[in-house]
């Protein structure tokens, strides 16, 4: 006849055997198919390479239409400093869409109307816009973040309150089809 303590010991023993059996079938490394008990606790997973790239796409809405080119730029903030990663010029006659292929990371996006056409932001003359008031955009490897829309407006102007330096931004319509949409074939082909 079984006693309560024997039944409890048997239940615990069965549970341990079940857990051990399941743990032995957990792969440590999916590439070389190694299995083992400790792998269940290590939970090793492949992390994406930092240099893998993603795509940021969006548009600039301008009210009223601009008389000067629009400079759109992607930047990162490190230790309170802004570092421009890439920039692009949108011509005054449009279209006002952009695409940036950048390494995975955390970015911010801004645009300004460059009245002096010197790639320098002048708050006394140039309209500016910050995406989500300078909020971050998290870009994962091989991910596309789209619908990044900026608005340059006269009635509610924004200011870019940090110093930054632009090298001459890319010109033209490298990755846009004739109707102004982003041409994904050119983006995949490395035009960006």
Image: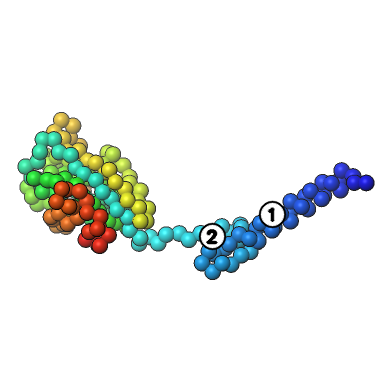
Colour style of the rendered protein structure = rainbow
> Which residue shows up at 12% across the image and 41% down it?
126
**Tag 1's secondary structure?**
helix
Q: Position of residue 164 (x, y in %)?
A: 21, 51
Dot 1 surroundings within 10 Å: few (below 14), some, or many (20 or more)?
Answer: few
Residue underneath mark 2: 44
155 and 11: which is toward the camera:
11
Q: Position of residue 57 (x, y in %)?
A: 26, 48
Q: CA distance from mark 1 to mark 2?
A: 19 Å
Q: Are marks 1 and 2 in contact (CB under 8 Å)?
A: no
Which residue in the rendered view is the most extreme toward the bottom? 32
> Which residue shows up at 86% across the image and 46% down it?
5
Observer able to see residue 95 = yes
Q: Residue 120 got which mark?
A: none
Q: Position of residue 123 (x, y in %)?
A: 14, 41
Q: Quadrant of residue 110?
A: top left
Residue underneath mark 1: 19
20 and 159: which is toward the camera:
20
> Which residue shows up at 15% across the image and 38% down it?
62
Q: Position of residue 152 (x, y in %)?
A: 17, 38
Which of the marked residues, 1 or 2, is nearer the chain's N terminus?
1
State whether residue 1 is above or below residue 155: below
Observer able to see residue 165 = no
> Which residue shows up at 31% across the image and 42% down it?
135
Dot 2 surroundings within 10 Å: few (below 14), some, or many (20 or more)?
Answer: few
Quarter placement of the C terminus: bottom left
């Amino acid at each position: 006849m079984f006693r309560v303590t024997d039944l409890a010991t048997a239940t615990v023993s069965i549970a341990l055997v079940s857990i051990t059996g399941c743990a032995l079938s957990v792969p440590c490394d999916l590439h070389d198919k190694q299995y083992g008990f400790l792998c269940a606790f290590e939970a090793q997973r492949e992390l994406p390479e930092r240099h893998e790239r993603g795509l940021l796409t969006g548009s600039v809405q301008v009210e009223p239409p601009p008389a000067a080119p629009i400079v759109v730029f992607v930047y990162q903030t490190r230790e309170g400093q802004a570092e421009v990663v890439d920039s692009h010029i949108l011509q005054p006659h449009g279209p006002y869409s952009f695409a940036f292929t950048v390494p995975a990371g955390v970015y911010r996006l801004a645009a300004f109307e460059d009245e002096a056409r010197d790639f320098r932001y002048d708050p006394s003359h140039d309209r500016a816009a910050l995406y989500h008031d300078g909020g971050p955009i998290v870009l994962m490897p091989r991910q596309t973040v789209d619908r990044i829309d900026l608005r340059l407006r006269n009635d509610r102007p924004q200011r870019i309150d940090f110093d930054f330096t632009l090298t001459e931004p890319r010109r033209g319509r490298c990755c846009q089809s004739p109707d102004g949409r982003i041409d994904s074939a050119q983006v995949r082909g490395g035009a960006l």
